[in-house]
Image: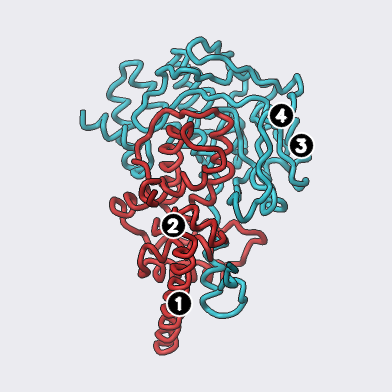
Chain colours: A cyan, B red
Amino acid sequence: MTDPERISKRGAGLAAQLLQAGADEQPSEGGAQRTLVALGVSGVVLTSTSAVSAAAGAKLTSVVSSGAAMSGAAGASATIGVLPAVALAKWIGIGVVAGIGVAGAAAVATAPSEPPRAVSSAARAATSVRPQPAMPKSPAPGPPLALAPAPEASRVLVTPLATANVVDPPPAAFPLDVGAPLSAEVAVVDRGRSLLGAGRASEALAQLEGYEREFSEARLLPEVLFLRLEAYERLGRSSDARRIAARLVRDFPKSPHAARARKLLTD
Amino acid sequence: MPAEALAVEEQACPPSASPERIVGLVRDHYAFVWRLLRRLGIGEGDADDAAQRVFLAAAGRLDGVEEGRERAFLYGVALNVGARARRSLGRRREEPLEAAGERAAPQPNAEQLLERRQARALLDRLLDEMPEDLRVVFVLFELEELSTPQIAELCNIPTGTAASRLRRAREDFEERVARAEARRRFSGDEP
């Protein structure tokens, strides 16, 4: 059976134009990354270069190894960045409280030798998520993860959540520039979650409360608010928790995290 | 097994699969899920959240999904999430231009952006008017560029049924486009 020619391939005509416009539409930059954060997959940044995205799909690069692994990555061929370790820090999805240990869950306890802003400008430009549909548009399956041994300098420590030995934050906890790479935001969220998972709610709050100030784009704001809500609850600061919950509901009513916030507000 | 059987309840569970598999799932299929949700009627401003819901729901059941069947599984979850989202959120047809996900390279100019946005708005309106079974097959073939056998597998229908639905869907769509074009010419409006 032969499939008919696709209407969009005809080139001319309103029907073709409409379908081409629909096919061109891409998700926003941070959507896939936010999903990974919500799934509790830490230390992973989805990146791709526009030049290779159609053929290669997104690349995976560790946050902490991004400075080394990503330099020169932008504009490169369809290679996949190193993923030294992917850790399932915890489930922070709908209705599940951060900090509840999940069997087999682990946190990435990173001790970056340099702050996330060390990501090269080329790599920063490439920090956009443009995953491609697997069947028709990216016939080559993604390579297996964590294949290449990470350089010593970019090693990620994977520690069970319950016993996570959270490393003290480096002096410059946040990247300071506007338009910081998404990897830097992910690193802050991961660290806040890691601290929260280790029972250090006050320190987690210290990390997370500076997030909006430091990241003008705040692409992971719903996740950060959710973690702050959890931290406030753990500290018994119920009025603060309710304030954050109200904000989550007001500003991100369709976020999966809003469901938990609503529950808190109605309890 | 009917296609509906693939649609699991939208209920988030702790992820059941390895982190590597979850990352691969998001990496390989996020754009597919997002665009599918968009063309199935989820507004642009809601598509990220809806896609996140799909993956949150899917991750908890991923261990039970055979390797290579992830897309079919996500398709089922996305249909379910999409249907719920449409019911609960409604559709936002008018969205600010600055919210547009215009990230195709090369960057279009403002006029092209506007034209593309208008084209998508009309496309979504026409798709909204199509019968659901035809719409799904049409979107998968014309926009996601799946073959008829792939669509049949995804929707769990015979290949002949997929081909028949596709033929009817294309006729339906082209008729709607012709009517829209005639209306536009008559009124002198752009789509």
Q: Residue at x 53, y 14 (%)?
A: A160
**Vertical position of residue B82 compared to residue A8: above or below:** above
> Which tag is nearer the camera, tag 1 or tag 3?
1
For marks 3 and 4, the one nearer the N-term is 3
> Which tag is nearer the camera, tag 4 or tag 2?
2
Q: Secondary structure at mark 1?
A: helix
User: Residue B157 has which mark?
Assistant: 2
Question: Which of the 4 image quadrants contains residue A254?
Answer: top left
The chain to which mark 1 is attached is B
In whole angstroms, how far apart are the C-alphas of marks 3 and 4?
19 Å
Q: How many marks?
A: 4
Work out which quarter of the rendered image holds the C terminus of chain B and state it. bottom left
* Callout 2 and callout 3 share a chain: no
- From the image, tell me which residue sits under label 4: A147
The chain to which mark 3 is attached is A
* Callout 1 and callout 3 share a chain: no
* Callout 3 and callout 4 share a chain: yes
For marks 1 and 2, the one nearer the N-term is 2
- From the image, tell me which residue sits under label 1: B171
**Mark 1: which amino acid?**
Glu
- Pinpoint residue A106: horizontal percent, then vertical percent: 53, 19
- Pinpoint residue A219: horizontal percent, then vertical percent: 51, 40
In whole angstroms, how far apart are the C-alphas of marks 2 and 3?
47 Å
